[in-house]
Image: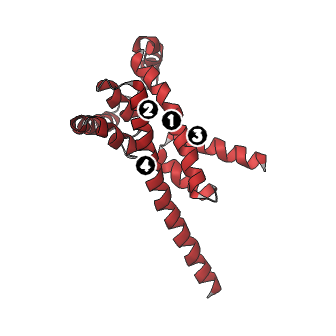
């Protein structure tokens, strides 16, 4: 029992780090029996990320060694292909558009951006926007948590409903 829980937890942590809540919430809803357990788990992982992102944005000189290592790795493996450059450029343009529009909304922009589970949104971009708008950390934690909770609830209820419909359809097919 405990081993299954630990395995589920590790799977969700890895999925959340690699993908985002757009992928980790459906997996959590499928793995756990109740949707609110999935919401609490993903919400907690989102909140744990916020101090890490603030640390990265406030102390860029302390993480220079990471960027230097990444540059060396990129040169060593020659990852400067045209297609990859174009994808990165398009992603940066999308993030810039999202940030420009969200700055118009101010504090509500932080909530909206952190609630977006797609490219250009999420906790990373929400923390960046809060940092750029110079919102107090305590207040920005509340705004980021609100956006994360809204997103987790919408995604979990949506995927939970889809899961319930599929289960009922399978029961009808097997019974009939």
- What residue would you read off at disc 3? 14
- What residue would you read off at disc 4? 151
Instruction: Identify the image's colour scheme: rainbow, by chain, secondary structure or one colour.
Output: secondary structure
Per the model, the C-alpha gap separating discs 3 and 2 is 23 Å
101 in relation to 158, above or below: above
Per the model, the C-alpha gap separating discs 2 and 4 is 15 Å
Ranked by sequence position, the earlier of labels 4 and 3 is: 3
Per the model, the C-alpha gap separating discs 2 and 1 is 8 Å
Count how many numbered circles sit on residues in the image: 4
Give the residue drawn at x 39%, y 37%.
Answer: 143
Q: Which is nearer the eye, 10 or 141?
A: 141
- What residue would you read off at disc 1? 47
Q: Is residue 91 visible?
A: no
* Label 1 with label 3: CB-CB less than 8 Å: no
Ranked by sequence position, the earlier of labels 2 and 4 is: 2
* Label 2 with label 1: CB-CB less than 8 Å: yes
Ranked by sequence position, the earlier of labels 3 and 2 is: 3
The spot of residue 88 in percent (x, y) is 32, 35
Q: Between tags 2 and 4, which lies in front?
A: 2
Give the residue drawn at x 48%, y 46%.
Answer: 21
Per the model, the C-alpha gap separating discs 4 and 1 is 13 Å
Helix, strand or loop at mark 4: helix
Q: Between tags 3 and 2, which lies in front?
A: 2
Give the residue drawn at x 38%, y 40%.
Answer: 114
Task: Left or right? Give the position of 129 relative to 16.
Answer: left
- What residue would you read off at disc 2? 141
Q: Between tags 2 and 1, which lies in front?
A: 2
* Label 4 with label 1: CB-CB less than 8 Å: no
Helix, strand or loop at mark 2: helix
Per the model, the C-alpha gap separating discs 4 and 3 is 19 Å
């Amino acid at each position: 029992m405990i081993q299954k829980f630990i395995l589920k937890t590790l799977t969700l942590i890895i999925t959340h780090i690699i993908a985002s809540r757009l992928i980790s919430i459906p997996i959590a809803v499928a793995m756990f029996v109740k949707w609110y357990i999935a919401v609490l788990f993903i919400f907690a992982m989102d909140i744990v990320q916020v101090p890490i992102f603030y640390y990265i944005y406030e102390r860029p000189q302390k993480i220079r060694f990471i960027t230097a290592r990444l540059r060396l790795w990129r040169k060593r493996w020659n990852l400067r292909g045209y297609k990859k450059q174009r994808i990165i450029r398009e992603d940066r343009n999308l993030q810039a558009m999202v940030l420009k529009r969200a700055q118009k909304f101010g504090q509500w922009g932080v909530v909206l951006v952190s609630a977006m589970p797609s490219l250009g949104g999420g906790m990373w971009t929400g923390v960046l926007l809060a940092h750029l708008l110079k919102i107090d950390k305590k207040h920005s934690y509340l705004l980021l948590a609100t956006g994360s909770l809204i997103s987790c609830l919408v995604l979990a209820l949506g995927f939970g409903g889809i899961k319930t419909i599929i289960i009922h359809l399978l029961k009808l097919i097997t019974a009939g």
